[in-house]
Image: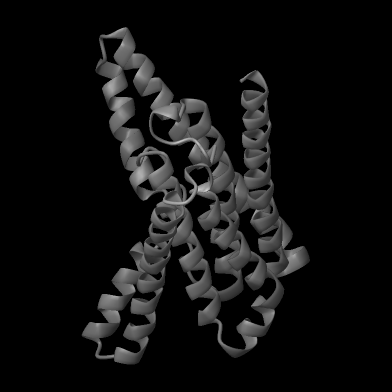
Amino acid sequence: MFRHHGKYRTYKHNLSIASLLSFVAGVVNVVGFLAVQKLTTNVTGHFAYFVDEVFKLNFLNGVVYFLYIFFFFLGAFISSLLVEIVYKKSEKYVYIIPALAEAFILIYIGFFGEFHISTSPDVIVYSLLFAMGLQNSLVTSISNATVRTTHLTGLFTDLGIEIAQLLFSKFKKQKYKLVSSIKLRFTIIAFFFFGGIFGGIFYSKIGLNLLIVAAVLLIIGVFFDSLKLFILGNKSANNV
């Protein structure tokens, strides 16, 4: 699901990566909010707060909200930059590096987040928004903008449009395409919800360590994807 892109990418690949990454984003969303009472998977609300603080002339608070937005953007930029750099050396592993970088950030916050809560809680927000920027850019790039996993606003918009189109669709091929897209969007919403429920239940038990669990799931996904690539590569070599 991480290694296929372009014409080699299938609907099944998109379903797989959507399930994994939306679950991780759901966990991060709830855990981040419970830990520091801030949104840590998207920046829509932060932009509104940024403008509000600027108009109130609370420039210091405004800078903090600006940095929230900036770190999400920076994560997206770094993710795309890594893809471009790695692509020149190994096309097969081009999307694995950003995924592992995200996992590393989640592990770091999982281990050291409690320290930052008592000293500088904004570091947690910066780090998680950066990680979600990495993820959003990664999955957008790999799926040709078909899959988005860190926020649901645009997703519900697209879902509403497609369901309305489905009601008036007359062609079988068009209906199949719409149903497939709707199924993908429902999958993202469901796993984001499951991740949130999972985060809400277990945060009271293990706190920010829950982010380590999310990181491990991400690493497992990358590992099995790489293992499939290795096995298929050996089979191809043996058939030559």
Horizontal and vertical percent position of residue 190? 54, 39
Q: What scheme was used to colour the molecule?
A: one colour
What quarter of the picture does the C terminus occupy? Answer: top right
Judging depth in this view, the residue of 181 and 35 nearest the camera is 181
Q: Is residue 195 above or below residue 167?
A: below
- Name the residue located 45 percent from the left edge and 46 percent from the top edge: 139
Q: Is residue 21 visible?
A: yes
- Name the residue located 42 percent from the left edge and 23 percent from the top edge: 180
Q: Is residue 159 above or below residue 173?
A: below
Q: Is residue 104 left or right of residue 75?
A: right
Q: In this view, does 56 lie above or below 176?
A: below
Judging depth in this view, the residue of 145 and 47 nearest the camera is 145
- Extreme left residue here? 55
- Name the residue located 36 percent from the left edge and 34 percent from the top edge: 159
Q: Is residue 64 left or right of residue 198?
A: left
Which of the 4 image quarters holds residue 225? top right
- Extreme right residue here? 205
Which of the 4 image quarters holds residue 176? top left
Judging depth in this view, the residue of 40 and 79 nearest the camera is 79
Horizontal and vertical percent position of residue 43? 37, 65
What quarter of the picture does the N terminus occupy? Answer: top right
Q: Is residue 151 visible?
A: no
Q: Is residue 128 above or below residue 23?
A: below
Q: In this view, does 138 lie to the left or right of 25?
A: left
Horizontal and vertical percent position of residue 42? 41, 61
Horizontal and vertical percent position of residue 192? 54, 47
Q: How many marks?
A: 0
